[in-house]
Structure formats: structure tokens, C-alpha cells
Amino acid sequence: MSDDRNGFVGLISFLTGAALGATLALLFAPQSGAETRKQIKDVSDKVADEVKENYDKIAKEAKKAIEQVKTASDKAIDNVKTFIDGAKTGLKKEIKEEIQEETKAPAKKKA
């Protein structure tokens, strides 16, 4: 889980750096202010779209992982319940058998 988070932070850092680099390149390019502002807007819109798309992908994967953990934990809980029920049944059977044995055995007399 930590690796996924580090990957996401790395992705955001990369995209931020790319946007910053593109913006600086546009600012120092020999063109009019209107052209530069338009290019900056286009680049920032593109980066925003990429970030949103990547966020949506990561959110889907996280939701999928959460569902898998939930399913696995539900199965584990069911297995534990089944084990406990089996153990209770086995213990009840053993107790009944011991009681039957004790009631069948003749009582020992003290000398």
C-alpha cells in the first residue's frame, strides 16, 4: 500500500515538474504575450486532464483492492466461524460420551 502511495506522489511530482518546465519554456520563448498565455493555458489544461485521468485510475484500483480485502476478510471470518462451530460440536459430543461412560460405570465403593 505504501508503494502505491509513493508511486502516486512520484507521479504527481513528475507531472508538476513537467508542467513547470513547459511553462518556463513558454515564458522564455520569443513570442507575443497572448500566444504565451494561450500556450500556458493549453499546457495546464492538458496536465490537469492527465492528473484527473491518473487519479481516476488510481481510485478505481484502490476501490478494487478494498473490495478484494473485504472479500478475503469475509471468507476468513466465515472459516473461523465454521472452525468454532465444529469445535463446539466436537466438544459437546465428547462431553456427552464422557457423561454416558460415567453413568454406565459402576460406582466405586470406599473401603
Image: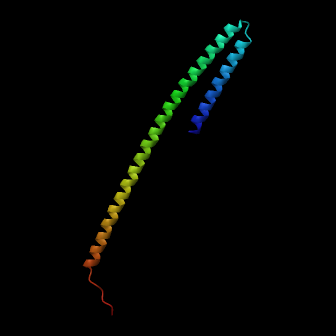
Q: From the image, which quarter does the N terminus lie in?
A: top right
Does 29 sit above or below residue 15?
A: above
Residue at the (49%, 32%) spot, across then down: 61
In the image, farthest residue toward the left = 104
Residue at the (37%, 56%) spot, across then down: 83
Q: Position of residue 23 (x, y in %)?
A: 69, 16
In the image, farthest residue toward the front = 34
In the image, farthest residue toward the bottom = 111
Q: From the image, which quarter does the C terminus lie in?
A: bottom left
Q: Is residue 65 left or right of residue 87?
A: right
Residue at the (63%, 23%) spot, across then down: 15
Callout count: 0
Residue at the (38%, 54%) spot, across then down: 81
Q: Position of residue 55 (x, y in %)?
A: 54, 28
Does 99 sit above or below residue 60?
A: below
Q: Is residue 81 left or right of residue 46?
A: left
Q: Position of residue 58 (x, y in %)?
A: 53, 30
